[in-house]
Amino acid sequence: MNTSLKTAMQNFAINQALNYVENAPEENIPKLMAFVDRHSPSGWYESQRAAVRQAIEEKGNWYQLILKAYELDPGVRKAFFQNLLFNGSLKGSATQNDMAEKYGCNIPWAILLDPTSACNMHCTGCWAAEYGHKLNLSLETIDSIIRQGKELGVYLYIYTGGEPLVRKADLIRLCEMHPDCEFLSFTNGTLIDEAFCQEMLRVKNFVPAISLEGFEEANDSRRGEGSYAKVKRAMELLKSHHLLFGISTCYTSRNYADITSEEFFDYLIESGALFCWFFHYMPVGNDAAIELLPTPEQRETVMRNIRAFRETKPIFTMDFQNDAQYVGGCIAGGRRYLHINAKGDVEPCVFIHYSNCNIHNTTLLDALQSPLFMAYHNGQPFNDNMLRPCPMLENPDLLPKMVSETGAVNTDYQSPESAEHLCEKTSRYAEKWTPKATELWDCCAGCSKCSKERSN
């Protein structure tokens, strides 16, 4: 069977399955899961699929989350399922695996890119706050990145910055140009208005992840007075239009209790958010606020609270520093994602600004085969303890070595920082975290639930 015919048949089957569920979600969702199981690549997220299947059978909080998706605009919901679940995760993952084997390098599931370095805010501890405001990836360059990415099986594109919505018109145009992809954007939320909601409803494949650092006092202390009220208004608009959106939050020594409280989780759910991504504060930049790094006890609190609420609250959460066990360690270096900044530098990690190549004079595949990316490929996982996944934060001896051996250069827009200087800021943190990480990981190794998750 030729490739185009096979793809057409797959798309027909997917559309039929989605339409089938639309008619009676509660009755037919379990049958859709059986369809996913039949068409999934061997070994693809087996433990996660089993958890979803169990949640559906038990009608618990995850089942309630699935049903909340059926409160979304039907076109938005269908585009999300088609583009992320089927194109990105089923068809895409199979292509990614084939390409990784063919070319001997990592192939990402998602590509992060900065449409612009400009931002209308200046938040404490944000690496984008270090950048200038004059750099942009052209519409043609972003289109080229997406086209190259789709050849490798990548259908998820995530905008960072800067503030991506400074480029609203171009972002919507890219949604139109690539209706088979899902576009997610980290945003401060202040530029989301009625007109933009209507554009999101029209294109259907754009999802905001709004930055929120806790309740009003904690949020505005980092993002500026009045920012919390603007985020609240943006969430109200998105919910009223039945649009899919989520939250992105960075936990620090100051806000960790706020953002992992039951009150905060309930607020996000009530506001209409369907997901929340938690990021550990990274002391990137010469003037980074080291005091914002959480203590081992604070990080443990974050980990335990998120995992506890994951069992009871209908919102999808991912703790990118503490959930490495579910993805086998560090996901950077193209293993699950890569980052392209507004200057075009192709970086293994959105938080670690070193590169061997620029997208303006190399292909995406060549970048994935460049020395620094191959150092990630050959070094992952960077630690057998999945609570110590990062070559900068928890294993600070590794990053300077990789940068030196590969000849990578710093890509900071304004104030270049050596890998040695960056990792000097994390070495004390790593020293303190290591015994706690060992204690927690040994506990996980002896826990039947964790052992099962790790084996999968």
Image: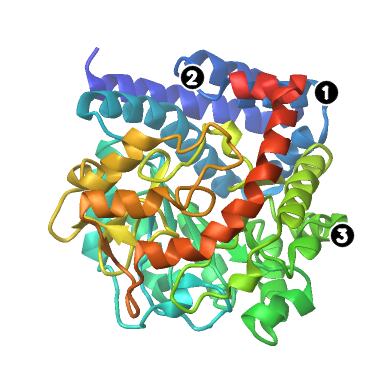
Front residue of 220/169: it is: 220
The answer to whether residue 326 shows anywhere in this view is yes
- Determine the secondary structure under disc 3: helix
Q: CA distance from mark 3 to mark 2?
A: 37 Å
User: Would you say 141 lies left or right of 439 here?
Assistant: left
Residue 81 picture location, percent across and down: 54, 37
Front residue of 441/327: it is: 441
Q: Report the residue marked by disc 1.
A: 58
Residue 178 picture location, percent across and down: 34, 50
User: Would you say 150 lies left or right of 357 here?
Assistant: right
Q: Which mark is residue 263?
A: 3
Q: Report the residue marked by disc 2.
A: 40
User: Would you say 23 lies left or right of 456 here?
Assistant: right
Viewer-nearest of labels 3 and 1?
A: 3
Residue 406 position (above or below residue 443)? below
Do callouts 3 and 2 mark residues in contact (Cβ within 8 Å)?
no
Q: Residues within 10 Å of mark 3 (few under 14, many from 20)?
A: few
Amino acid type, mark 3: Glu
Residue 389 picture location, percent across and down: 52, 42
The answer to whether residue 244 shows anywhere in this view is no
Seen at 70% across and 81% down, the residue is 220
